[in-house]
Image: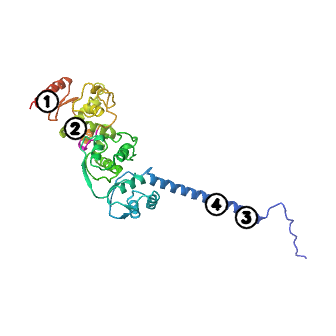
Amino acid sequence: MENYTPREPRDNNAPPARRKQKKQSGCAGALLYLIVIFGIAAILSMVLLFSANDVFAFVKDNRSVTLTVPEDTTVKALSKELDQEGVIHYGSLFKLFVTVTGKDTTVLAGDYTLNPSMDYGAIIRSLRNSTGENTVTITIPEGYTIDQIREALLKHHVCSEESLDEALNSYPFKWDFLKGKTPGKNWLEGYLFPDTYEFYQKNDSAVQVINKMLNNFADKYDQPIADGAAGLGRSMHDIVTIASLVEREAQKEDEFAEIAGVIYNRLNNSQQFPYLQIDATVQYAVGHKDQLTEADLKVDSPYNTYTNKGLPPGPIASPGYTALYAASHPEDNGYYYYVAMPDGSHLFAKTNAEHEANKRKAAEAFEKASTQ
């Protein structure tokens, strides 16, 4: 009894220490649970975002990838190859897309030019529409318009008229040089590079055909042309437009840069020469004719460079490399006029008086040529 030490009275209003620890532990657990839930949601959102980007190609690389598909290739095997080549990022998702959309489980053999900027639908259309058989070689000459290119493709039965018109006028090709342009009638004018192509007759998709030409343009518009454009302070659109004028006006390659020089001389002296007065632009507006009339020269069209100042709104044809190079490297001359001769060459002049004299010479030459 002598060693007994009385305990202090207990405060009944104070919560037990153990219960307080349990409450803190419960709050921490709830917070951790919320963090996990939000983390999972964020991860799922990112997965959905990246998956949607891969399926619909909202923001993806713009480059061409050439694949050779052997006979009896399955979508499973091809999905893996497309993933490895960087055309898509999720091979399993592509395979699932094909299954869900009910497409074929085998891919037709052949050579394909694809682009990561193509959505899954465009890739599938390309892969289902080539057989490696019945190929046709088509030459698109320099200076062809969209309408002429369209006719050439339809003549050789490369693809259906409906699919071709949709590809030309509606398909949102994602090349950098088309940024800011809205799909519509003739929006690709000037950018379908003239060249000799091999297509799979009746089996190539229209998107694949047009994309092949656009890819060729991207390759041909090289660094020397880009550097020349930068030195002139001109955009790619300006260069392609000027090149199309040169392509349609010049017939002899040694005059390409000379005619480009005339165009720039007028553009750079717009107060004295506000109008380019190029017949080829009027022909584009009224339909290509051998001889323009006075009424044609007054036609109400933004492409009429007799009535509208400066450059037309866009290209009037597909220029080749020589024309593109001339447009970016014009000859430094003092000419403001030129007139065509019967052999396709031109007479150039610095003054209107010289030009009038050249016009008389040209008229005499044409009259003489008509009697021979």
What residue type is disc 2 on? Ala
Q: Do the residues labelled 1 and 3 touch (CB within 8 Å)?
A: no
Mark 1, residue position = 366
Instruction: Please give the name of the residue rendered at 26% of the width and 36% of the height, measured from the top-left corner.
Output: 245
Q: Do the residues labelled 2 and 4 touch (CB within 8 Å)?
A: no
Point out the image quarter for the C terminus.
top left
Mark 1 or mark 2: name the one nearer the start of the chain.
Answer: 2
In this picture, which residue range is highlighted in magenta? Answer: 317-322
- Mark 1: give few (<14), some (14-19) or many (20+) Cα within 10 Å: some
What residue type is disc 1 on? Phe
| Residue 88, quarter of picture | bottom left
Instruction: Please give the name of the residue rendered at 11% of the width and 31% of the height, measured from the top-left corner.
Output: 369
Task: Tell me, for residue 257, which label it has, or none.
Answer: 2
Mark 4 or mark 3: name the one nearer the start of the chain.
Answer: 3
Is the image coloured rainbow, by chain, by secondary structure, or in one colour?
Answer: rainbow
- Foreground label between 1 and 3: 1
Instruction: Please give the name of the residue rendered at 61% of the width and 58% of the height, measured from the top-left corner.
Output: 37
Q: Main secondary structure of the magenta part?
A: loop
Mark 2 or mark 4: name the one nearer the start of the chain.
Answer: 4
Mark 4, residue position = 33
Image coordinates of residue 322 in percent, x first then y, are: 23, 42
Q: What kind of element bears circle 1?
A: helix
Given the current orientation, which residue lies at the most extreme top position? Answer: 353
Queried whether the magenta region covers residue 242, the answer comes back as no
Measure the alpha-carbon separation of dots 1 and 2: 25 Å
Point out the image quarter for the N terminus.
bottom right
Mark 4 or mark 1: name the one nearer the start of the chain.
Answer: 4
